[in-house]
Image (cartoon, grey):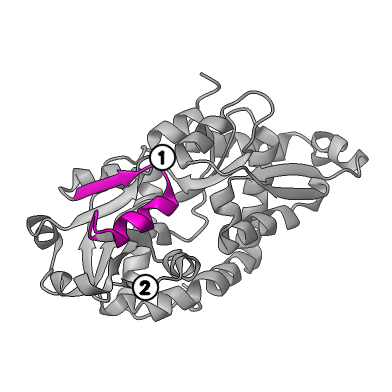
């Protein structure tokens, strides 16, 4: 297995490299070349304006690494994309943004900064409009389970295992696009989507029969990281350094407000019934990150704050 390692260890190594090795020496090749470095971003991330924008933000904050070009990867399911990241040569995917898990942190190189502020762990249900009455009497997680409401998710998504661990009936498929078809054909009742992505999803699907259920909010700690290949130190270092610079100068907060502010406000999160689930899949390194992010989001929601408000 190619170079496993924890998020904590990776962070320490990255920061140590920045301190110990002179930046000019470390990046001499980038400085001497005018050819852009090509990065292949997993197609689902490339098609997401928010994910593509935050990656560009990180790269723009690190000009010492030289010019860059981001390409859309060939279309493939999430599990295949993560396998592709482990290929030693000629990868079809260089970078992917997905929810973290211990297996992913062990086998890939995680940049342990939640790129959406933790919003991926806040989920609403996309449902068929004619099925809305079934959800009206759901008050808590027990009601959701007892009523046998089924939730559609991707086969390789950590969410599937999280929901199952909390007693929820889960129906899966390997292809994201197919899940909308399955929902339309009544194969399951709720397609649980992150509040940071659901409006974009529905705009792309453009089916008036599908709506966002207005009263429920599923919540569990699930940080969403950028992942690169296990030996791709330069890319990992550039992304982490760029994100940290963006956090420090306020441009990351502006990014969150720009791309997620409309969703947070229009979904009326503070008026929804909060169904909190446990996530048994977090690594020791990601447990405190996930817990802190979820607690902060819960507090901000209860206080009626939006992403445009500063913490």
Location of residue 94 by image quarter: top right
Residue 310 appearing in the image: no
In primary-sequence order, the first of circles 2 and 1 is 1
- Of helix, strand and loop, which one carries label 2? helix
Q: Residue at x 37, y 58 (%)?
A: 180
Comparing 296 with 43, the one in front is 43
Q: Residue at x 9, y 60 (%)?
A: 147
- Of helix, strand and loop, which one carries label 1? loop
Magenta stretch bounds: 169-189
State the mark number for residue 300: 2
Comparing 293 with 128, the one in front is 128
Q: Hey, which residue is sitting farthest front in the picture?
A: 185
- Residue 204 position, x and y percent, is 50, 66
Q: Residue at x 76, y 34 (%)?
A: 21
Comparing 33 with 253, the one in front is 33
Location of residue 229 by image quarter: top right
- Residue 175 position, x and y percent, is 42, 46
Residue 186 sits inside the magenta stretch:
yes
Q: Which residue is mark 1?
A: 285
Q: Residue at x 57, y 33 (%)?
A: 85
- Is 196 located above or below residue 101 in the figure? below
Q: Hey, which residue is sitting farthest left in the picture?
A: 146
Tell me how far mark 2 sits from mark 1, CA to CA: 24 Å
Residue 190 sits inside the magenta stretch:
no
Q: Is residue 120 left or right of residue 231?
A: left
Label 2 crowd bin: few (<14), some (14–19), many (20+), radius 10 Å: some
């Amino acid at each position: 297995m190619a170079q496993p390692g924890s998020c904590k260890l990776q962070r320490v190594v990255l920061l140590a490299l920045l301190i110990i090795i002179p930046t000019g020496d470390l990046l001499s090749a980038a400085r001497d070349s005018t050819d852009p470095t090509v990065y292949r971003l997993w197609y689902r991330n490339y098609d997401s304006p928010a994910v593509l924008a935050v990656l560009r933000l990180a790269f723009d904050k690190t000009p010492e690494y030289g010019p860059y070009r981001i390409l859309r990867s060939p279309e493939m399911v999430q599990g295949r994309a993560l396998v592709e990241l482990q290929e030693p040569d000629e990868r079809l995917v260089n970078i992917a943004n997905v929810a973290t898990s211990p297996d992913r942190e062990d086998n890939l190189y995680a940049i342990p900064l939640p790129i959406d502020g933790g919003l991926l762990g806040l989920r609403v249900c996309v449902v068929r409009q004619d099925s809305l009455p079934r959800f009206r009497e759901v008050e808590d997680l027990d009601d959701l389970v007892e009523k046998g409401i089924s939730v559609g998710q991707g086969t390789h998504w950590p969410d599937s295992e999280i929901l199952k661990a909390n007693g929820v009936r889960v129906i899966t498929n390997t292809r994201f696009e197919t899940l909308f078809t399955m929902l339309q054909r009544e194969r399951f009742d709720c397609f649980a989507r992150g509040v940071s992505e659901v409006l974009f999803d529905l705009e792309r699907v453009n089916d008036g029969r599908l709506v966002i259920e207005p009263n429920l909010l599923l919540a569990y700690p699930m940080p969403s990281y950028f992942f690169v290949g296990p030996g791709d130190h330069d890319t990992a270092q550039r992304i982490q350094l760029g994100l940290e610079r963006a956090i420090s100068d306020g441009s990351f907060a502006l990014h969150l407000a720009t791309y997620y502010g409309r969703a947070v406000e229009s979904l009326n999160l503070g008026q929804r019934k909060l169904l909190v689930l446990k996530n048994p899949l977090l690594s020791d390194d990601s447990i405190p990150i996930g817990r802190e992010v979820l607690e902060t989001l819960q507090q901000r929601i209860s206080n009626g704050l939006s992403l445009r408000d500063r913490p």
